[in-house]
């Protein structure tokens, strides 16, 4: 057990058989409650005060006690006090014996600003706390590192703690476009204008790879002067998974174009910003014959080819999505009707001039396009301009296909 009783007031929680069996008064005091009953009346799970979802996490780890695979570890976390105030704590989890049975002891050290600089920065003692953290921890002043732990070094693919302390300016790890906001954030934290909070940032590791980190930064006193402590966890996999899910939610899985939900979202975002708006509905002519003759797999390939062609021709002029089946929809803002019709004609010609080879045979696939236009987009219902484009598209079909009607 780490001997820190003489420099930190810490609370204690003991867990046995996945049940909290003991809570001492120090932990209750840290949270600002007067009694155990008052604390339980506010929250039935005392572990939830330590951090969101901490209860599930620590109980899963406590299951390793009987197998002998539990390892002492620490985390810098952020407790919610009785009044809702967030404070930084260091939680040291270690195995003990409780009534002759293996149990889990949590020592909760309050490392917030209320501790004096002399207590907090008994440097060698504090470094021992940081070393036991399984999160990256750095203390810096004006982006010059003062203390860093090995986990931080590994997260950032740095050479060593010494190299970081001696040579690093933290701004070198932040994309240039974010320097101004990083400096502004630092000034607000160091002066107390901004309280500590968790947020996700993008950093460039020493090996040049960009990663996303969830960081918590707050002001502390380091050797008698203000500094900022940053605790970080790599959340790149989570961020990328969320981005993939967000992309999937608004994109057609086959063509990677916007789906209907994304198109309606785009309309909602632009309906009050523009006056003129054109809508095109594009339908591949005789597409059923392609599916029936060559199979749906080949048909899907045709859809992807034309989706890419549409993206190329529409480019930055508007937004395009897959409307359903072999139908595609385009919205072109801030262009007159003549320009929209000319763009539709370019798309039609490009399709007719794009030969496809299926099972060794060349086929020509044309499109029928319907165009609608309004110069008062904010005053109409989006479904009306879509309905008119749909009507004009079917006129193109009835007039022989491979044409634009608007």
Image (cartoon, grey):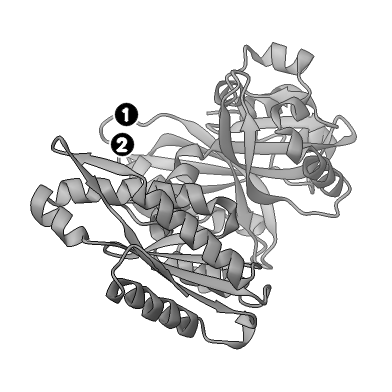
The disc at residue 64 is 2
Residue 255 shown left or right of residue 109 in the figure: left
Q: Nearer the viewer, residue 344 or 32?
A: 344
Disc 1 is placed on an element classified as loop
Could you tell me which residue is drawn at 66 percent across and 58 percent down? 29
Residue 400 shown left or right of residue 280 in the figure: left
Q: Could you say where residue 213 lies in the image, as x and y percent from the top left? A: 58, 39
- In the image, residue 43 above or below residue 57: below
Residue 256 shown left or right of residue 6 in the figure: left
Q: Do the CB atoms of the residues marked 1 and 2 lie less than 8 Å apart?
A: yes
Disc 2 is placed on an element classified as loop
Q: Could you say where residue 217 lies in the image, as x and y percent from the top left? A: 71, 43
Q: Nearer the viewer, residue 298 or 107?
A: 298
- In the image, residue 98 above or below residue 54: above
Q: Nearer the viewer, residue 127 or 140?
A: 140
Question: How many numbered dots are placed on residues in this image?
Answer: 2
The disc at residue 69 is 1
Report which quarter residue 67 is drawn in: top left
Find the distance from the CA under tag 1 to the CA under tag 2: 5 Å
- In the image, residue 167 above or below residue 212: above
Q: Tell which circle, 1 or 2, labels the residue nearer the N-terminal end.
A: 2
Could you tell me which residue is drawn at 34 percent across and 44 percent down? 354
Could you tell me which residue is drawn at 69 percent across and 37 percent down? 230
Q: Could you say where residue 294 lies in the image, as x and y percent from the top left? A: 11, 48
Q: Could you say where residue 304 lies in the image, as x and y percent from the top left? A: 32, 48
């Amino acid at each position: 057990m780490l001997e820190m009783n003489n420099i930190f007031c810490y609370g204690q929680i003991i867990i046995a058989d996945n049940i909290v069996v003991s809570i001492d008064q120090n932990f209750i005091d840290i949270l600002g409650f007067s009694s155990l009953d008052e604390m339980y009346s506010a929250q039935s799970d005392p572990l939830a005060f330590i951090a969101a979802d901490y209860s599930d996490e620590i109980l899963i780890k406590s299951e390793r006690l009987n197998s002998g695979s539990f390892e002492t570890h620490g985390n810098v976390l952020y407790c919610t006090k009785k009044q809702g105030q967030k404070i930084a704590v260091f939680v040291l989890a270690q195995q003990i014996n409780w009534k002759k049975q293996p149990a889990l002891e949590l020592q909760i050290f309050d490392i917030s600003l209320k501790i004096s600089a002399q207590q907090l920065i008994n440097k060698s003692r504090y470094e021992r706390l940081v070393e036991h953290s399984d999160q990256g921890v750095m203390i810096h002043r004006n982006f010059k590192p003062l203390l860093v732990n090995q986990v931080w070094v590994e997260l950032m693919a740095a050479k060593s703690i010494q190299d970081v302390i001696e040579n690093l300016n933290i701004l070198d790890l932040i994309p240039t476009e974010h320097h101004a906001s990083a400096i502004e954030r630092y000034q607000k934290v160091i002066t107390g204008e901004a309280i500590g909070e968790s947020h996700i940032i993008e950093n460039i590791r020493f090996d040049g790879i960009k990663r996303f980190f969830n960081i918590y930064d707050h002001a502390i006193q380091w050797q008698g002067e203000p500094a900022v402590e940053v605790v970080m966890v790599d959340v790149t996999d989570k961020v990328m998974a969320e981005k993939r899910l967000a992309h999937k939610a608004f994109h057609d899985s086959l063509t990677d174009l916007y789906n209907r939900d994304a198109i309606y979202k785009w309309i909602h975002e632009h309906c009050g910003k523009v006056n003129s708006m054109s809508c095109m509905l594009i339908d591949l002519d005789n597409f059923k014959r392609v599916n029936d003759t060559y199979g749906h797999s080949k048909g899907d390939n045709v859809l992807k080819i034309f989706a890419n062609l549409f993206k190329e021709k529409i480019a930055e002029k508007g937004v395009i999505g897959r409307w359903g089946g072999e139908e595609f929809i385009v919205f072109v803002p801030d262009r007159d009707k003549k320009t929209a019709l000319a763009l539709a004609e370019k798309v039609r010609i490009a399709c007719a001039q794009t030969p496809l080879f299926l099972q060794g045979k060349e086929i020509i696939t044309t499109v029928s396009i319907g165009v609608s236009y309004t110069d008062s987009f904010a005053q109409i219902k989006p479904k009306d301009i879509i309905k008119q484009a749909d009507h004009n598209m079917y006129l193109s079909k009835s007039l022989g296909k491979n044409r634009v009607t608007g």
